[in-house]
Image (cartoon, rainbow, N blue to C red):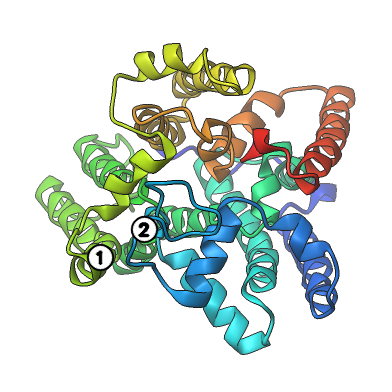
């Protein structure tokens, strides 16, 4: 797929090159102010830290347990190995530097990371598809209701950050930097390695297309190496990128004798490999079926549409993420795919052609849903677990 022409006609008053930076810096300052609040014993951290946050916090404090039942209020068969190490390591580092407890450090870490994630996503989308209304894109991203997990001590922000860093570095032709970002990505989530292979394949496919004007194909610069060179580059990307996952597997092998413990322990959460359709059918009998099944069904439909309108890289990455998730169960299906920055880009594509009234109406609805979902989270509604 060819990179779209970037010389779009943009009204000067939007100042798209400066507005996102101002917005990101303002958001950054506001979110950093949260760090002051975290220094006191308030209910902020307790209200924000539920479920996975408790696992990450336990790992950040004490490392990975050697017993299967090793987490906070763990059920039989559950273990901390299911949670990849990048986020708890980052929590521990921020905690040491700031002297905050690890959960508060996780909040602060994501507060700092969110504006950077916004900027990287904006930069990728602008170069890949063009952005005429930067104000709408930034507000859409920040108010997106299922972006709740970007503001909580969860790994969504850090994973999204490493993903977008890998994409933007590939887009710029910086292969080694993309590989380093890929290594962090594979250390953040089990979906990181499959996504890395998607990027490698896309890199080769882009090289196979002959650009009529000798311009840049997606993820490649004009005049770069041949198809053979692209294959070699993709091999380098994967080799560097999987080092994050490999390091975690070596750690697990050395510690407990099972390099794939992160996969085997998933059974403690009722996850097992099966046909996605079987999981969707079985999901109709689950307590939260009304939440889980619609997401599992609607997400691939949205991604097929995204592919059809030219958002092929986004749909490929999100499609692999959906397939891996639903192949093992429907748990958290409303978070794993929707709380991905590329999914926000897909929804933005659907909303960008709306007239001004509908755009602002959409943002208003997002704000209301943000408040509702935030209240549900604070009260520990297990629907959001």
Q: Position of residue 347 (x, y in %)?
A: 63, 30
Marks 1 and 2 in Cβ contact (< 8 Å): yes
Q: Residues within 10 Å of mark 2 (few under 14, many from 20)?
A: many
- Identify which residue, 54 or 8, lies in the foreground: 54
Q: Which mark is residue 252?
A: 1
Is any atom of residue 120 visible in this view?
Answer: no
Left of 6 or right of it: where is 24?
right
Q: Is 360 situated left or right of 234 in this image?
A: right
Which residue: 56% across, 67% down? 57
Question: Where residue 5 sits in the image (x, y, percent)?
Answer: 51, 39
Where is residue 212, by image quadrant?
top left
User: In terms of sequence position, does the residue under pointer 1 or pointer 2 come before the other?
Assistant: 2
Between 25 and 72, the residue placed more toward the observer is 72
Cα distance in 3D space between marks 1 and 2: 8 Å
| Residue 143 shows in this picture | yes
Q: Position of residue 178 (x, y in %)?
A: 35, 62
Q: Secondary structure at mark 1?
A: helix
273, 77: nearer the viewer: 77
Residue for badge 2: 81
Image quadrant holding the N terminus, namely top left
The image quarter containing residue 313 is top left
Residue 40, x across and y down, in percent: 84, 78
In this view, the residue farthest toward the left is 228
User: Is the residue 316 above or below the residue 194 in the image?
Assistant: above
The quadrant of the image that shows the C terminus is top right
């Amino acid at each position: 797929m060819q990179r779209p022409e970037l010389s779009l006609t943009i009204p000067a008053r939007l100042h798209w090159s400066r507005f996102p930076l101002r917005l990101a810096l303002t958001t950054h300052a506001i979110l950093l102010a949260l760090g002051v609040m975290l220094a006191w014993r308030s209910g902020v951290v307790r209200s924000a830290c539920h479920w996975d946050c408790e696992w990450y916090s336990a790992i950040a404090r004490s490392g990975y347990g050697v017993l299967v039942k090793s987490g906070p209020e763990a059920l039989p068969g559950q273990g901390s190995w299911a949670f990849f190490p990048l986020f708890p390591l980052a929590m521990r580092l921020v905690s040491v530097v700031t002297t905050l407890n690890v959960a508060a450090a996780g909040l602060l870490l994501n507060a700092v990371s969110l504006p950077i994630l916004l900027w990287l996503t904006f930069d990728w989308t602008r170069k890949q598809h063009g952005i005429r209304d930067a104000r709408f894109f930034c507000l859409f991203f920040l108010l997106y209701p299922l972006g709740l997990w970007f503001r909580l001590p969860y790994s969504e922000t850090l994973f999204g950050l490493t993903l977008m860093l890998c994409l933007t570095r590939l887009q710029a032709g910086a292969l080694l930097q993309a590989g380093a970002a890929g290594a962090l990505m594979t250390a953040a989530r089990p979906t990181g390695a499959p996504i890395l292979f998607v990027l490698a394949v896309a890199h080769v496919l882009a090289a196979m297309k002959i650009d009529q004007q000798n311009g840049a194909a997606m993820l490649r610069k004009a005049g770069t190496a041949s198809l053979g060179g692209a294959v070699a580059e993709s091999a380098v990307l994967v080799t560097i990128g999987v080092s994050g996952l490999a390091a975690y597997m070596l750690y697990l092998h050395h510690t407990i004798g099972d390099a794939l413990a992160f996969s085997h322990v998933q059974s403690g959460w009722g996850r097992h490999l099966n046909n996605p359709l079987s999981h969707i059918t079985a999901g109709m009998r689950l307590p939260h079926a009304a939440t889980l099944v619609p997401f599992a069904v609607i997400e691939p439909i949205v991604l097929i549409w995204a592919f059809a309108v030219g958002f092929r890289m986004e749909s490929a990455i999100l499609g692999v993420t959906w397939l891996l998730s639903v192949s093992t169960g429907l748990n958290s299906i409303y978070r794993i795919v929707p709380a991905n920055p590329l999914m926000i880009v897909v929804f933005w594509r659907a909303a960008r052609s709306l007239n001004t009234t509908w755009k602002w109406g959409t943002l208003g609805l997002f704000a209301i849903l943000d408040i509702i979902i935030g209240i549900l989270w604070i009260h520990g509604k297990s629907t959001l677990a």
